[in-house]
Image: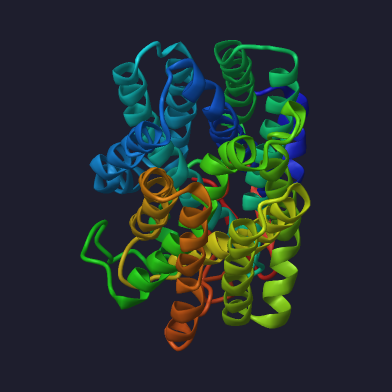
Amino acid sequence: MQPEIIRNLAEKDAKSWYRLSLAAFYFLHGLVFASWACRIPDIKTALGMSDGVLGAMLFFPPAGQLATMALAGWAVGKFGSRAIIIFAATLYPLCLLMLGLATSTWQLALGLFLFGISLNFSNISINAQAIGVERLYRGQSIMASFHGIWSLAGLTGGILGMILVACGISPIAHFTLVYVVGLLILFTMKGTMLPRDGRTPQNKACNENVGQRVWVWPDRYLLMLGLIAFGAMACEGTMFDWSNVYFEDVIHPPKYLSRLGYVAAMFCMMCGRFTADGMIARFGVVRILTVSGITIASGLFTVALFPFLATATLGFMLIGFGVSAVVPIAYSLSGRSTLMKSGAAIAVVSTLGMLGFLLGPPVIGFVAELLNLRWSLGMVGFVGLIIVVFARMISRDIKPPKQCDENHPCPDSLLDTKITTGACTNELA
Protein backbone atom coordinates (compact mmCIF):
# COMPACT_ATOMS: atom_id res chain seq x y z
CA MET A 1 0.00 0.00 0.00
CA GLN A 2 1.19 3.45 -0.86
CA PRO A 3 1.08 6.28 1.70
CA GLU A 4 -2.19 8.21 1.35
CA ILE A 5 -0.44 11.48 0.51
CA ILE A 6 1.34 9.86 -2.44
CA ARG A 7 -1.89 8.27 -3.67
CA ASN A 8 -3.68 11.62 -3.49
CA LEU A 9 -0.92 13.38 -5.41
CA ALA A 10 -0.86 10.60 -7.99
CA GLU A 11 -4.61 10.83 -8.52
CA LYS A 12 -4.24 14.52 -9.33
CA ASP A 13 -1.49 14.06 -11.91
CA ALA A 14 -0.45 10.46 -12.41
CA LYS A 15 1.73 11.06 -15.45
CA SER A 16 3.88 13.46 -13.43
CA TRP A 17 4.51 10.63 -10.98
CA TYR A 18 5.51 8.34 -13.85
CA ARG A 19 8.00 10.97 -14.93
CA LEU A 20 9.33 11.65 -11.43
CA SER A 21 9.73 7.97 -10.58
CA LEU A 22 11.47 7.19 -13.85
CA ALA A 23 13.75 10.20 -13.40
CA ALA A 24 14.82 8.74 -10.04
CA PHE A 25 15.85 5.49 -11.73
CA TYR A 26 17.74 7.41 -14.42
CA PHE A 27 19.54 9.16 -11.58
CA LEU A 28 20.43 5.83 -9.97
CA HIS A 29 21.64 4.44 -13.31
CA GLY A 30 23.92 7.43 -13.86
CA LEU A 31 25.15 7.54 -10.26
CA VAL A 32 26.24 3.90 -10.30
CA PHE A 33 28.18 4.27 -13.54
CA ALA A 34 29.75 7.59 -12.53
CA SER A 35 30.85 6.07 -9.22
CA TRP A 36 32.73 3.35 -11.07
CA ALA A 37 34.16 5.73 -13.67
CA CYS A 38 35.58 8.21 -11.19
CA ARG A 39 37.33 5.48 -9.17
CA ILE A 40 38.99 3.76 -12.14
CA PRO A 41 42.39 5.41 -11.45
CA ASP A 42 42.26 4.23 -7.82
CA ILE A 43 41.39 0.65 -8.76
CA LYS A 44 44.01 0.72 -11.51
CA THR A 45 46.64 1.77 -8.97
CA ALA A 46 45.45 -0.66 -6.29
CA LEU A 47 45.73 -3.63 -8.66
CA GLY A 48 48.95 -2.38 -10.31
CA MET A 49 47.53 -2.39 -13.84
CA SER A 50 49.15 -0.81 -16.89
CA ASP A 51 47.10 1.05 -19.54
CA GLY A 52 47.03 -2.12 -21.64
CA VAL A 53 45.79 -4.32 -18.77
CA LEU A 54 43.16 -1.73 -17.85
CA GLY A 55 42.09 -1.69 -21.49
CA ALA A 56 41.70 -5.47 -21.38
CA MET A 57 39.59 -5.21 -18.22
CA LEU A 58 37.31 -2.70 -19.91
CA PHE A 59 36.41 -5.30 -22.53
CA PHE A 60 34.41 -7.30 -19.97
CA PRO A 61 31.43 -4.91 -19.61
CA PRO A 62 30.67 -5.05 -23.37
CA ALA A 63 31.09 -8.82 -23.25
CA GLY A 64 28.39 -8.97 -20.59
CA GLN A 65 26.24 -6.63 -22.59
CA LEU A 66 26.59 -8.64 -25.80
CA ALA A 67 25.76 -11.84 -23.96
CA THR A 68 22.40 -10.38 -22.90
CA MET A 69 21.53 -8.17 -25.89
CA ALA A 70 18.55 -10.20 -27.14
CA LEU A 71 17.65 -11.43 -23.66
CA ALA A 72 17.18 -7.92 -22.26
CA GLY A 73 14.97 -6.83 -25.15
CA TRP A 74 12.93 -10.03 -24.87
CA ALA A 75 12.59 -9.64 -21.09
CA VAL A 76 11.27 -6.08 -21.40
CA GLY A 77 8.76 -7.24 -24.02
CA LYS A 78 7.74 -10.27 -21.94
CA PHE A 79 7.63 -8.89 -18.39
CA GLY A 80 7.36 -5.15 -19.01
CA SER A 81 9.85 -2.39 -18.37
CA ARG A 82 8.71 -1.85 -14.77
CA ALA A 83 9.62 -5.37 -13.64
CA ILE A 84 13.00 -5.23 -15.36
CA ILE A 85 13.78 -1.79 -13.89
CA ILE A 86 13.18 -3.21 -10.40
CA PHE A 87 15.38 -6.23 -11.18
CA ALA A 88 18.18 -4.09 -12.62
CA ALA A 89 17.99 -1.50 -9.83
CA THR A 90 18.63 -4.34 -7.38
CA LEU A 91 21.48 -5.97 -9.31
CA TYR A 92 23.32 -2.97 -10.78
CA PRO A 93 24.45 -1.31 -7.51
CA LEU A 94 25.28 -4.76 -6.11
CA CYS A 95 27.71 -5.35 -8.99
CA LEU A 96 29.34 -2.03 -8.14
CA LEU A 97 30.17 -3.43 -4.71
CA MET A 98 31.87 -6.40 -6.40
CA LEU A 99 34.19 -4.02 -8.23
CA GLY A 100 35.19 -2.36 -4.97
CA LEU A 101 35.90 -5.72 -3.34
CA ALA A 102 38.11 -7.03 -6.18
CA THR A 103 41.65 -7.87 -5.06
CA SER A 104 42.88 -9.39 -8.33
CA THR A 105 42.39 -8.84 -12.03
CA TRP A 106 40.30 -12.01 -12.48
CA GLN A 107 37.89 -10.85 -9.75
CA LEU A 108 37.69 -7.44 -11.40
CA ALA A 109 37.05 -9.07 -14.78
CA LEU A 110 34.19 -11.17 -13.37
CA GLY A 111 32.72 -8.15 -11.63
CA LEU A 112 32.90 -6.07 -14.80
CA PHE A 113 31.21 -8.82 -16.81
CA LEU A 114 28.28 -8.88 -14.37
CA PHE A 115 28.37 -5.08 -14.25
CA GLY A 116 27.87 -5.01 -18.04
CA ILE A 117 24.93 -7.42 -17.81
CA SER A 118 23.14 -5.39 -15.15
CA LEU A 119 23.93 -2.12 -16.96
CA ASN A 120 22.35 -3.52 -20.11
CA PHE A 121 19.10 -4.54 -18.38
CA SER A 122 18.92 -1.17 -16.62
CA ASN A 123 19.62 0.85 -19.76
CA ILE A 124 17.09 -0.90 -21.99
CA SER A 125 14.30 -1.01 -19.41
CA ILE A 126 14.47 2.66 -18.35
CA ASN A 127 14.55 3.85 -21.95
CA ALA A 128 11.64 1.59 -22.89
CA GLN A 129 9.63 3.05 -20.02
CA ALA A 130 10.69 6.57 -21.06
CA ILE A 131 9.10 6.06 -24.48
CA GLY A 132 5.85 5.02 -22.80
CA VAL A 133 5.89 8.09 -20.56
CA GLU A 134 6.82 10.37 -23.46
CA ARG A 135 3.74 9.24 -25.40
CA LEU A 136 1.52 10.60 -22.63
CA TYR A 137 2.83 14.08 -23.42
CA ARG A 138 1.14 14.20 -26.86
CA GLY A 139 4.25 14.32 -29.05
CA GLN A 140 6.26 16.62 -26.76
CA SER A 141 9.92 15.57 -26.55
CA ILE A 142 10.92 14.75 -22.96
CA MET A 143 13.51 12.02 -23.58
CA ALA A 144 16.46 14.41 -23.36
CA SER A 145 15.32 15.60 -19.93
CA PHE A 146 15.55 12.03 -18.64
CA HIS A 147 19.07 11.79 -19.97
CA GLY A 148 19.73 15.16 -18.38
CA ILE A 149 18.89 13.54 -15.04
CA TRP A 150 21.38 10.79 -15.90
CA SER A 151 24.01 13.46 -16.56
CA LEU A 152 23.11 15.24 -13.33
CA ALA A 153 23.75 11.94 -11.57
CA GLY A 154 27.07 11.66 -13.38
CA LEU A 155 28.02 15.16 -12.26
CA THR A 156 26.93 14.35 -8.72
CA GLY A 157 28.92 11.13 -8.78
CA GLY A 158 31.98 12.93 -10.12
CA ILE A 159 31.86 15.64 -7.47
CA LEU A 160 31.21 13.06 -4.76
CA GLY A 161 34.18 11.08 -6.04
CA MET A 162 36.43 14.15 -5.92
CA ILE A 163 35.43 14.80 -2.32
CA LEU A 164 35.85 11.21 -1.21
CA VAL A 165 39.23 10.87 -2.94
CA ALA A 166 40.41 14.08 -1.28
CA CYS A 167 39.27 12.68 2.09
CA GLY A 168 41.06 9.37 1.49
CA ILE A 169 37.84 7.30 1.40
CA SER A 170 38.31 3.88 -0.19
CA PRO A 171 36.37 2.77 -3.29
CA ILE A 172 34.47 0.09 -1.37
CA ALA A 173 33.23 2.62 1.21
CA HIS A 174 32.24 4.93 -1.67
CA PHE A 175 30.40 2.12 -3.48
CA THR A 176 28.61 1.05 -0.29
CA LEU A 177 27.22 4.56 0.09
CA VAL A 178 25.93 4.43 -3.50
CA TYR A 179 24.36 1.02 -2.84
CA VAL A 180 22.40 2.43 0.11
CA VAL A 181 21.20 5.35 -2.03
CA GLY A 182 20.09 2.83 -4.66
CA LEU A 183 18.02 0.88 -2.13
CA LEU A 184 16.33 4.09 -0.98
CA ILE A 185 15.40 5.03 -4.55
CA LEU A 186 14.15 1.53 -5.32
CA PHE A 187 11.87 1.22 -2.31
CA THR A 188 10.47 4.76 -2.47
CA MET A 189 9.84 4.99 -6.22
CA LYS A 190 8.99 1.50 -7.48
CA GLY A 191 5.29 1.90 -6.68
CA THR A 192 4.68 4.92 -8.90
CA MET A 193 6.13 3.78 -12.22
CA LEU A 194 4.15 3.14 -15.39
CA PRO A 195 3.00 -0.41 -14.62
CA ARG A 196 3.00 -1.97 -18.06
CA ASP A 197 4.04 -1.21 -21.61
CA GLY A 198 1.28 -3.12 -23.39
CA ARG A 199 -2.25 -1.92 -24.04
CA THR A 200 -5.54 -3.44 -23.12
CA PRO A 201 -7.76 -4.67 -25.98
CA GLN A 202 -9.97 -1.57 -25.90
CA ASN A 203 -6.87 0.59 -26.54
CA LYS A 204 -5.67 -1.55 -29.40
CA ALA A 205 -6.06 1.30 -31.90
CA CYS A 206 -3.34 3.23 -30.11
CA ASN A 207 -0.93 0.33 -30.21
CA GLU A 208 0.81 0.67 -33.54
CA ASN A 209 3.18 -2.08 -32.40
CA VAL A 210 0.46 -4.66 -31.72
CA GLY A 211 1.23 -6.85 -34.69
CA GLN A 212 4.97 -6.50 -34.48
CA ARG A 213 7.27 -9.25 -33.34
CA VAL A 214 9.51 -8.78 -30.33
CA TRP A 215 12.67 -9.51 -32.30
CA VAL A 216 13.43 -9.40 -36.02
CA TRP A 217 16.54 -8.37 -37.89
CA PRO A 218 16.74 -4.56 -37.66
CA ASP A 219 16.08 -2.48 -40.76
CA ARG A 220 18.18 0.34 -42.23
CA TYR A 221 16.43 2.93 -40.04
CA LEU A 222 17.32 1.21 -36.76
CA LEU A 223 20.83 0.32 -37.89
CA MET A 224 21.63 3.93 -38.75
CA LEU A 225 20.24 5.09 -35.42
CA GLY A 226 22.42 2.47 -33.77
CA LEU A 227 25.51 3.67 -35.61
CA ILE A 228 24.77 7.28 -34.62
CA ALA A 229 24.50 6.13 -31.00
CA PHE A 230 27.69 4.09 -31.43
CA GLY A 231 29.68 7.12 -32.54
CA ALA A 232 28.40 9.35 -29.74
CA MET A 233 28.78 6.78 -27.01
CA ALA A 234 32.25 5.71 -28.08
CA CYS A 235 33.32 9.31 -27.49
CA GLU A 236 31.26 9.51 -24.31
CA GLY A 237 32.75 6.28 -22.96
CA THR A 238 36.23 7.55 -23.75
CA MET A 239 35.50 10.66 -21.72
CA PHE A 240 34.13 8.65 -18.80
CA ASP A 241 36.86 6.02 -18.56
CA TRP A 242 39.96 7.96 -19.64
CA SER A 243 39.44 11.60 -18.64
CA ASN A 244 40.69 11.04 -15.09
CA VAL A 245 43.62 8.91 -16.28
CA TYR A 246 44.48 11.51 -18.94
CA PHE A 247 44.56 14.31 -16.39
CA GLU A 248 46.71 12.30 -13.96
CA ASP A 249 49.15 10.87 -16.53
CA VAL A 250 49.37 13.70 -19.10
CA ILE A 251 48.27 16.97 -17.47
CA HIS A 252 49.68 16.26 -13.96
CA PRO A 253 47.44 18.72 -12.07
CA PRO A 254 47.18 18.83 -8.27
CA LYS A 255 45.44 15.70 -6.93
CA TYR A 256 42.21 17.54 -6.14
CA LEU A 257 41.93 18.67 -9.80
CA SER A 258 42.53 15.25 -11.36
CA ARG A 259 38.75 14.77 -11.89
CA LEU A 260 38.25 18.27 -13.35
CA GLY A 261 37.89 17.13 -16.97
CA TYR A 262 35.28 14.54 -16.04
CA VAL A 263 33.28 16.97 -13.89
CA ALA A 264 33.43 19.71 -16.56
CA ALA A 265 32.20 17.29 -19.24
CA MET A 266 29.36 16.02 -17.04
CA PHE A 267 28.28 19.57 -16.19
CA CYS A 268 28.13 20.54 -19.86
CA MET A 269 26.37 17.29 -20.78
CA MET A 270 23.77 17.95 -18.11
CA CYS A 271 23.19 21.54 -19.33
CA GLY A 272 22.98 20.36 -22.93
CA ARG A 273 20.42 17.69 -22.14
CA PHE A 274 18.16 19.94 -20.12
CA THR A 275 18.04 22.40 -23.05
CA ALA A 276 18.05 19.81 -25.84
CA ASP A 277 14.28 19.28 -26.06
CA GLY A 278 13.76 22.98 -26.86
CA MET A 279 16.60 22.98 -29.37
CA ILE A 280 15.21 19.87 -31.08
CA ALA A 281 11.78 21.49 -31.37
CA ARG A 282 13.31 24.64 -32.86
CA PHE A 283 16.00 23.31 -35.21
CA GLY A 284 15.09 19.66 -35.85
CA VAL A 285 16.98 16.47 -35.10
CA VAL A 286 19.17 16.46 -38.22
CA ARG A 287 20.71 19.87 -37.55
CA ILE A 288 21.21 19.05 -33.86
CA LEU A 289 22.91 15.76 -34.72
CA THR A 290 25.18 17.44 -37.27
CA VAL A 291 26.30 20.19 -34.88
CA SER A 292 26.75 17.62 -32.12
CA GLY A 293 29.10 15.48 -34.19
CA ILE A 294 31.26 18.47 -35.13
CA THR A 295 31.39 19.64 -31.50
CA ILE A 296 32.44 16.19 -30.23
CA ALA A 297 35.26 15.93 -32.75
CA SER A 298 36.45 19.47 -31.97
CA GLY A 299 36.60 18.66 -28.27
CA LEU A 300 38.63 15.48 -28.71
CA PHE A 301 41.06 17.14 -31.11
CA THR A 302 41.52 20.00 -28.62
CA VAL A 303 42.29 17.54 -25.81
CA ALA A 304 44.81 15.66 -27.97
CA LEU A 305 46.59 18.67 -29.48
CA PHE A 306 46.76 20.95 -26.43
CA PRO A 307 47.64 18.95 -23.28
CA PHE A 308 47.31 21.78 -20.76
CA LEU A 309 44.90 22.14 -17.86
CA ALA A 310 42.76 24.94 -19.33
CA THR A 311 42.64 23.61 -22.90
CA ALA A 312 42.04 20.00 -21.83
CA THR A 313 39.18 21.14 -19.60
CA LEU A 314 37.72 23.15 -22.49
CA GLY A 315 38.03 20.11 -24.74
CA PHE A 316 36.13 17.89 -22.33
CA MET A 317 33.47 20.60 -21.99
CA LEU A 318 32.97 20.49 -25.77
CA ILE A 319 32.73 16.70 -25.67
CA GLY A 320 30.06 16.98 -22.96
CA PHE A 321 28.01 19.48 -24.95
CA GLY A 322 28.43 17.46 -28.14
CA VAL A 323 27.24 14.11 -26.83
CA SER A 324 24.39 15.55 -24.76
CA ALA A 325 21.57 15.36 -27.32
CA VAL A 326 22.66 12.50 -29.57
CA VAL A 327 21.66 9.46 -27.52
CA PRO A 328 18.29 10.88 -26.35
CA ILE A 329 17.46 11.60 -30.00
CA ALA A 330 18.48 8.10 -31.11
CA TYR A 331 16.45 6.40 -28.37
CA SER A 332 13.39 8.56 -28.95
CA LEU A 333 13.47 7.95 -32.72
CA SER A 334 13.88 4.20 -32.17
CA GLY A 335 10.54 4.20 -30.35
CA ARG A 336 8.91 5.25 -33.62
CA SER A 337 9.98 2.06 -35.37
CA THR A 338 7.24 0.30 -37.35
CA LEU A 339 9.25 -2.93 -37.46
CA MET A 340 9.69 -3.84 -33.79
CA LYS A 341 8.09 -3.28 -30.43
CA SER A 342 9.62 -0.41 -28.51
CA GLY A 343 11.60 -2.59 -26.10
CA ALA A 344 13.24 -4.54 -28.91
CA ALA A 345 13.89 -1.42 -31.02
CA ILE A 346 15.58 0.27 -28.07
CA ALA A 347 17.56 -2.93 -27.44
CA VAL A 348 19.01 -2.71 -30.97
CA VAL A 349 19.93 0.99 -30.81
CA SER A 350 21.01 0.79 -27.18
CA THR A 351 23.18 -2.25 -27.77
CA LEU A 352 24.98 -0.69 -30.72
CA GLY A 353 25.38 2.52 -28.76
CA MET A 354 26.59 0.78 -25.64
CA LEU A 355 29.05 -1.23 -27.73
CA GLY A 356 30.64 2.08 -28.66
CA PHE A 357 30.44 3.22 -25.05
CA LEU A 358 32.10 0.08 -23.73
CA LEU A 359 34.35 -1.01 -26.62
CA GLY A 360 35.84 2.45 -27.23
CA PRO A 361 37.67 2.71 -23.87
CA PRO A 362 39.54 -0.63 -24.07
CA VAL A 363 40.64 0.15 -27.63
CA ILE A 364 41.95 3.47 -26.31
CA GLY A 365 43.99 1.52 -23.76
CA PHE A 366 45.63 -0.68 -26.39
CA VAL A 367 46.40 2.25 -28.70
CA ALA A 368 47.80 4.19 -25.73
CA GLU A 369 50.05 1.24 -24.94
CA LEU A 370 51.37 1.20 -28.52
CA LEU A 371 51.57 4.98 -29.06
CA ASN A 372 50.41 7.29 -26.27
CA LEU A 373 47.18 8.47 -24.70
CA ARG A 374 47.11 11.75 -26.63
CA TRP A 375 47.25 10.00 -30.01
CA SER A 376 44.54 7.53 -29.01
CA LEU A 377 42.16 10.29 -27.88
CA GLY A 378 42.77 12.23 -31.08
CA MET A 379 41.85 9.19 -33.15
CA VAL A 380 38.49 8.93 -31.40
CA GLY A 381 37.65 12.41 -32.71
CA PHE A 382 37.18 10.89 -36.16
CA VAL A 383 34.62 8.48 -34.68
CA GLY A 384 32.57 11.49 -33.60
CA LEU A 385 32.30 12.52 -37.25
CA ILE A 386 30.31 9.33 -37.93
CA ILE A 387 27.35 11.16 -36.42
CA VAL A 388 27.54 13.90 -39.05
CA VAL A 389 27.57 11.38 -41.91
CA PHE A 390 24.66 9.27 -40.69
CA ALA A 391 22.59 12.28 -39.62
CA ARG A 392 22.39 13.32 -43.26
CA MET A 393 21.68 9.77 -44.40
CA ILE A 394 18.80 9.17 -41.99
CA SER A 395 16.99 12.47 -42.57
CA ARG A 396 14.56 10.97 -45.09
CA ASP A 397 13.78 7.93 -42.93
CA ILE A 398 12.73 9.72 -39.74
CA LYS A 399 9.20 8.72 -38.80
CA PRO A 400 6.59 11.00 -37.18
CA PRO A 401 6.03 10.61 -33.43
CA LYS A 402 3.34 8.31 -32.10
CA GLN A 403 0.89 10.29 -29.97
CA CYS A 404 -2.65 10.23 -28.65
CA ASP A 405 -5.63 11.86 -30.34
CA GLU A 406 -9.36 11.23 -30.78
CA ASN A 407 -8.74 8.30 -33.11
CA HIS A 408 -5.86 6.77 -31.11
CA PRO A 409 -6.65 6.55 -27.37
CA CYS A 410 -3.92 7.09 -24.80
CA PRO A 411 -1.91 4.26 -23.26
CA ASP A 412 -3.01 2.85 -19.92
CA SER A 413 -2.21 4.90 -16.83
CA LEU A 414 -0.46 3.83 -13.66
CA LEU A 415 -2.75 4.11 -10.68
CA ASP A 416 -6.44 3.39 -10.06
CA THR A 417 -7.26 6.75 -11.52
CA LYS A 418 -8.00 8.61 -14.73
CA ILE A 419 -5.68 10.68 -16.89
CA THR A 420 -7.24 13.25 -19.17
CA THR A 421 -5.09 14.33 -22.12
CA GLY A 422 -7.00 16.57 -24.48
CA ALA A 423 -9.92 14.65 -26.00
CA CYS A 424 -8.92 11.24 -24.70
CA THR A 425 -9.59 9.91 -21.23
CA ASN A 426 -8.60 6.37 -20.34
CA GLU A 427 -9.07 4.25 -17.28
CA LEU A 428 -6.87 1.64 -15.73
CA ALA A 429 -8.28 -1.86 -16.03
- The colouring scheme, among rainbow, by chain, secondary structure or one colour, is rainbow
Position of residue 20 measured from the top left corner of the image (x, y, whole percent):
69, 42
Which quarter of the picture shows residue 278?
Answer: bottom right
Which quarter of the picture shows residue 319?
Answer: bottom right
Q: Residue furthest front?
A: 371
- Does residue 311 appear to the left or right of 231 in the view shown? right
The foreground one among 10 and 311 is 311
Labels in figure, total: 0
Position of residue 373 measured from the top left corner of the image (x, y, whole percent):
50, 48
Relative to 307, does residue 338 appear above or below in the rendering? below
Which quarter of the picture shows residue 205?
Answer: bottom left
Position of residue 331 measured from the top left corner of the image (x, y, whole percent):
49, 61
Q: Residue at x 60, y 31 (%)?
A: 38
- Does residue 313 appear to the left or right of 327 in the view shown? right
The foreground one among 179 and 317 is 317
Query: Is residue 399 among what the camera can see?
Result: no
Q: Residue furthest left?
A: 217
Name the quadrant of the N terminus. top right
The foreground one among 304 and 125 is 304
Query: Is residue 177 among what the camera can see?
Result: yes
- Does residue 412 appear to the left or right of 368 in the view shown? right
Q: Residue at x 67, y 53 (%)?
A: 316
Relative to 263, does residue 379 appear above or below in the rendering? below
Position of residue 132 measured from the top left corner of the image (x, y, whole percent):
52, 55
Q: Residue at x 69, y 34 (%)?
A: 258
Q: Residue furthest bottom?
A: 396
Relative to 356, does residue 76 appear above or below in the rendering? above
